[in-house]
Image (cartoon, helix red, strand yellow):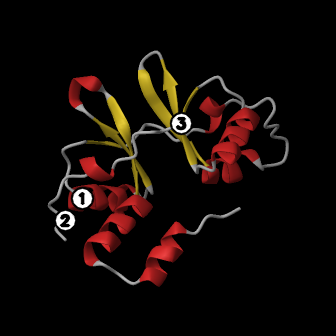
C-alpha cells in the first residue's frame, strides 16, 4: 500500500446533491431513503456546501427550530474544503485531519465537482490493500439502520 497513490479510484462519484433552498426535513428524508450520511449543496455557482447527519443533529434539534421551515443553506457546512482528483491518499488524509472533517469534496479542474471521498472510503481502501482481516472489513461495512 502506498499513500502516494492518487485518490481518483476511491472517489465516490454517485453523490446526492440538493438545492440550497431545500427544507431540512426534505433533506433528512432523502438521506434516510438513500441510506447516506451527507448531501452536497449546489447553486448555479456549483457546489457551495455540504450537510451531514451531524449538522442536522447539532443545528436543527435546538429548541425552536422547525425542520419543516429551515432550509439546508441555514445549516450547511461552508466554505467547502476541496481537493483535486490528482491528490494522493496521504495528502487527502492529512487535509482531512488538519481541517477536522470526515468528508472531502473532490474537484477535477475545469470540469468542477468530481465527487466525494470520506475517511471511511480511505480506511476501506487501505484495508483492502493490506488484506486485513475479514472481521475488520465486516465492521467497516456495518450499516446503521
Are the residues flagged by discs 1 and 2 in contact, CB closer than 8 Å?
yes
In front here: 136 or 26?
Answer: 136
- Residue depicted at x 46% and y 15%: 44
Identify the image quadrant of the N terminus.
bottom left
Pointer 2: what residue?
3
- Residue depicted at x 33% and y 59%: 98
Q: Residue 100 placed where, x, y %? A: 42, 59
Residue 36 placement, left or right of 116: right
Secondary structure, mark 2, is loop
Label 3: how many Cα within 10 Å (few below 14, some 14–19, many 20+)? some
Identify the image quadrant of the C terminus.
bottom right
Secondary structure, mark 1, is helix
**What is the spatial separation of the Cα atoms under label 1 and label 3, in whole angstroms?**
23 Å
Label 1: how many Cα within 10 Å (few below 14, some 14–19, many 20+)? many
Pointer 1: what residue?
89
Secondary structure, mark 3, is loop
Residue 91 figure quarter: bottom left
Pointer 3: what residue?
16
Q: Residue 90 placed where, x, y %? A: 22, 62
- Residue depicted at x 69% and y 29%: 71
In front here: 89 or 142?
Answer: 142
> In the rendered view, would you say 137 is above or below 90?
below
**What is the spatial separation of the Cα atoms under label 3 and label 2, in whole angstroms?**
28 Å
**What is the spatial separation of the Cα atoms under label 1 and label 2, in whole angstroms?**
5 Å
Compare marks 1 and 3 and give the one earlier in the sequence: 3
- Residue depicted at x 52% and y 41%: 77
Pair 1/3: label in front: 3
Amino acid at each position: 500500500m502506498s499513500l502516494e497513490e492518487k485518490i481518483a479510484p476511491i472517489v465516490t462519484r454517485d453523490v446526492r446533491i440538493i438545492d440550497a433552498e431545500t427544507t431540512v426535513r426534505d433533506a433528512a428524508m432523502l438521506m434516510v431513503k438513500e441510506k447516506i450520511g451527507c448531501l452536497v449543496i449546489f447553486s448555479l455557482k456549483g457546489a457551495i456546501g455540504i450537510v451531514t447527519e451531524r449538522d442536522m443533529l447539532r443545528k436543527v434539534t435546538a429548541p425552536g427550530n422547525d425542520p419543516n421551515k429551515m432550509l439546508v443553506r441555514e445549516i450547511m457546512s461552508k466554505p467547502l474544503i476541496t481537493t483535486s482528483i490528482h491528490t494522493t491518499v496521504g495528502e487527502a488524509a492529512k487535509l482531512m485531519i488538519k481541517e477536522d472533517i470526515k468528508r472531502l469534496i473532490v474537484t477535477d479542474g475545469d470540469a468542477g465537482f468530481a465527487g466525494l471521498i470520506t475517511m471511511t472510503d480511505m480506511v476501506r481502501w487501505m484495508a483492502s490493500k493490506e488484506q486485513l482481516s475479514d472481521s475488520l472489513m465486516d465492521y467497516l461495512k456495518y450499516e446503521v439502520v
